[in-house]
Image: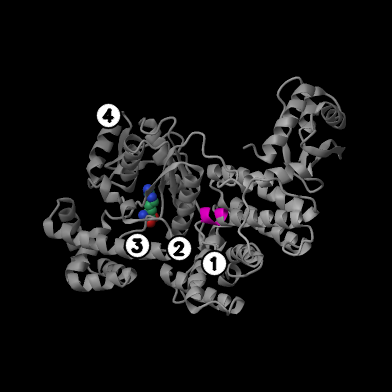
Amino acid sequence: METLEQLLRGRLARAFAEVGGGIADPVVQRSQRADFQANGALPLAKRLGVAPREVAERVLAVAELEGLIATAEVSGPGFINLTVDDAVLGRMIGAVNADARLGVPVAAEPETVVVDYSAPNVAKEMHVGHLRSTVIGDAVVRTLEWVGHRVIRRNHLGDWGTPFGMLIEHLADIGEAEAVRELSVGDLSGFYTAARKKFDADDEFKERARRRVVALQGGDETTIRWWRLLVGESKRYFGTVYERLGVRLTDADFVGESAYNEELGSVVEDLDRLGLIQVSDGAQCVFPAGFTGRDGTPLPLIVRKSDGGFGYAATDLAAIRDRVGELAATRLLYVVGSPQQQHFAMVFATARAAGWLADPARAEHIGFGSVLGADGKVLRSRAGGTIKLVELLEEARQRAAVVVAEKNPALSAEEQARVATQVGIGAVKYADLSTDRTRDYVFDFDRMLALEGNTGPYLQYANARIQSIFRKSGGEPVRDGAPVVVAAAAERALAIELLAFPEVVAEVADSLAFHRLAAYLFGVASAFASFYEQCPILKAPDPAVRASRLVLTDLTGRTLCAGLGMLGIGAPDRM
Ligand code: ARG
């Protein structure tokens, strides 16, 4: 099924090619002045040495517009304003509404994609950065699956390394039972902080912790058992957070850093054999081309520290080999905060130099900014410590419950609770996903829970209103593909908005810039609001118009649900 924009571009491309004597991009885009505008006459005019308006006139003289465009006129310096034929809109809306995929094609070349996201650290509270990674990663997974790719989730849990010396030693001090008690109630930061305090203050403890690291690496039985206990309890706790968030991360997706332990030795050996290793201050390093410090000296990527321990980078290199070599992935995505941008750039460059990351396989760091408090500083709890993720989510849910109870007191208590969860969690996710992920954003409950503006609740409410129209209509939605009537200005605007869904999904599946999908959904909901205000639906006098408006309404609801679904946000039927 060709999209409206593709149809327009195709027709105009032929005319532009004829006038230009070769391929010339018509540059079709949405327009304020008409439905669409083609701006390609301006660059083409430069090439031909003819006035742009003249080029635009020539294009219109040869363009075949029948059956697609109702009016086309040259405006301004040489733009071509295009108004789509109402009948075309009506036919396309009918067809898209009959399509379960809403006009979105299945990827022509499905890929295996590995998404590395969430990745909290054992025995350490998840912070808001992990929230962002989890929420964005979940949207990546859902969107790419929707488009038809094979998606493998990887929760690169921080479950190995020197901090385990102090964590296990602290466990030894307080005893297994107490450790389990603390961790099972989710008091990860209490546990971690106590260990850290001793480590910083007590040299004897520090020495024990150091020996414990050696015992862990050496596979000492008791040490391994305690390590497993820490990992197991932490995973269980993280699982409860994922459940609360409604993200698609399961136990099977945990493939922590320790999973690559066996590979680390050969990673360094292979790099050495390839001549990529240089020893610097006793550490084995790679100096990937193009990375220099402020003073111009080459920057090292440390793969093996001077004490023999392997670094974070070695694990990421082993993971790339596994993901490309064993999992046969061609797209590797890393949803990790922007401060790690350089780490990933250096790891990817090293993997390419080693031949582990080669065409068609490629890796992308999906970076993101920080979450800020109202004071513009990194979000902290009222006491000034790191904020506990579950508490944040619980507060969102409670505040949403107040909004829902106000909005719809008729709902049963059970339904109110269910809706409040969807609204509260959805609001948090939407606030995150609707801002350009590379930027910081301010965490503001009042703003994210507002029923007006570009918020999750606003979109959910638009859908709930649509569902209530169908409840009142006394009939099932009709999805038979028959053309509908699209005539009034608000109907046309909504139809054109809805027909753009496939383009937006394709663009977002590529850029993973979810704020564009969010902005699109907000545009759909806004177009629907104007339509709802200006065009009576159930009370439309002409039965054909009533039926058509119900199709537009139905398609709006499905588009909102599909889009919110890609963002990992539920859409309740009532609110
Ligand atoms: N555990 C790390 C952190 O909390 C994030 C890991 C990201 N993924 C990766 N493959 N390095 O900062």
* Disc 1/disc 3 C-alpha distance (Å): 24 Å
Query: Is label 1 in a helix, a strand or a loop?
Result: loop
Viewer-nearest residue: 141 or 137: 141
The disc label shown at residue 239, or none: 3
Residue at 41% x, 52% y: name it.
117
Q: Is there a contact, CB below 8 Å, between mark 2 and mark 3?
A: no
Query: Is label 2 in a helix, a strand or a loop?
Result: helix
Residue corresponding to mark 2: 128
Name the quadrant of the N terminus. top right
How crowded pointer 3 is (Cα within 10 Å; few <14, some 14-19, many 20+) is rated as: some
Q: Is there a contact, CB below 8 Å, between mark 4 and mark 3?
A: no
Kind of residue at badge 1 = Phe
Is 539 placed above or below 116 here? Answer: below
* Disc 1/disc 4 C-alpha distance (Å): 49 Å
Q: Is there a contact, CB below 8 Å, between mark 4 and mark 2?
A: no
The disc label shown at residue 273, or none: 4
Magenta span covers which residues? 562-567
Kind of residue at badge 3 = Gly
